[in-house]
Structures are given as C-alpha cells and as structure tokens.
Image (cartoon, rainbow, N blue to C red):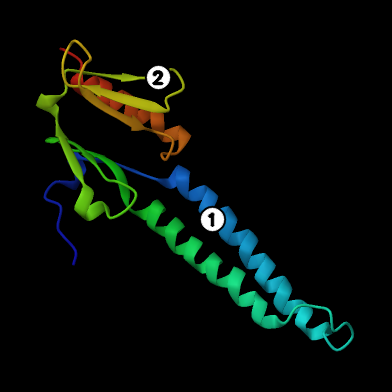
Amino acid sequence: MKKNIQSPEKELRFTRSGQAVMFWVSAAVLASVGITLLATAAYRDINPLLPHPAWALLPLGVSFIFVRIAMNLTKHAYLILTPLGIEIFPFFRPSVGMNLVVWQEIDHAEVNEKATLLTLHHNAEKSSGIHLSLKPIRADKRSLLAKAVLARVSPA
C-alpha cells in the first residue's frame, strides 16, 4: 500500500543510512565467508576435515537478513521535517510507533557540538522535551538537519 504525499517538495527526509553502513559491511563479510565455505567443498576429497558445504547456508542466510535490514534502513525515513512538524520514526515497527512533534510544541532546539544529539525543548525552562540521536544519519547530512531545525524554531 503506497500513500501519496501531498507536497513532497515541502519536506526533508533523513534516513538511517549512517546506521546501514554497519549492516552492509557485515553482510559483505558474511557473504564472503559463505562463498569461501562453498569453494572449499571441492577439496573435501583431498582433505576430509574441511567443513561440509551446508555450513555455508548459515553465513549466507544471515548475510541475506543483513542486506534486507540495510536496504530498509537506507530507504525508509528516520526523521521527516514537514510544514506541520517533525515526524520521528523508531527502528522497530515505524508505521505503528511514529511520533509527530508539531512546530508549535517546540520552544527552542539545541544541537551538541559534535552534531550527534538534537534536543527539542517544549518550554523555556528546559524541563520538558525530546532527545534525538543523530548518529543513525550520515555525518554529512547532520549539519543540514541541524540548520533546518534551528532555522525553523528560532525566533524571527
């Protein structure tokens, strides 16, 4: 089921592509282990101590799962900045656990010096708000996100 976005040009999407790198690398390593196990199966008649080729199914299966996770993280959004507010999607079951923080709820925002943490304060006393880790987002995209959020919530 595909939903149509009414104004896609008015939103900024940030995916978990920084987090997906770990899964892509792990999938590649596990796939190479599986292929190596399959390749050594031809020499079992010379050395019967080599593992059975069926053992290749385990790393290849886990590699397939990691590829699926990495594709999902690269494709689907983590944060979406819309004219209405910030949509926050969790790692597991994002369609059910999505959280919308409207711009009117945010008093001000802060980004730490390393651009790895975004804090959305709901009041001036900083006693209520949301902390969002920016580590799942690629490092080169974090400054764009910080600039967009800070420009939107800063007083004119």
Q: Which quarter of the figure has residue 57?
A: bottom right
Q: Position of residue 54 (x, y in %)?
A: 65, 82
Q: Is residue 9 above or below residue 155?
A: below
Q: Which quarter of the figure has residue 4?
A: bottom left
Task: Judge left or right: residue 96 versus residue 50.
Answer: left
Q: Is residue 39 above or below residue 102?
A: below
Q: Label 2 belongs to which residue?
A: 112
Question: Quick one: label 1, few (<14), some, or many (20+) residues within 10 Å?
Answer: some
The outermost residue toward the right is 46
Q: Label 1 belongs to which residue?
A: 24
Task: Judge left or right: residue 23 versus residue 57.
Answer: left
Q: Is residue 30 above or below residue 120?
A: below
- C-beta proximity under 8 Å, tags 1 and 2: no
Q: Is residue 44 above or below residue 102?
A: below
Q: How many tags in the picture?
A: 2
Q: Position of residue 101 (x, y in %)?
A: 16, 34
* Residue shown at the point (52%, 54%) measured from the top left: 23
101 and 155: which is toward the camera: 101
Q: Position of residue 150 (x, y in %)?
A: 27, 21
The outermost residue toward the bottom is 45
Question: Quick one: label 2, few (<14), some, or many (20+) residues within 10 Å?
Answer: few
Q: Amino acid at mark 1?
A: Trp
Q: Position of residue 39 (x, y in %)?
A: 75, 78
Q: Which quadrant, please, contains the C terminus?
A: top left
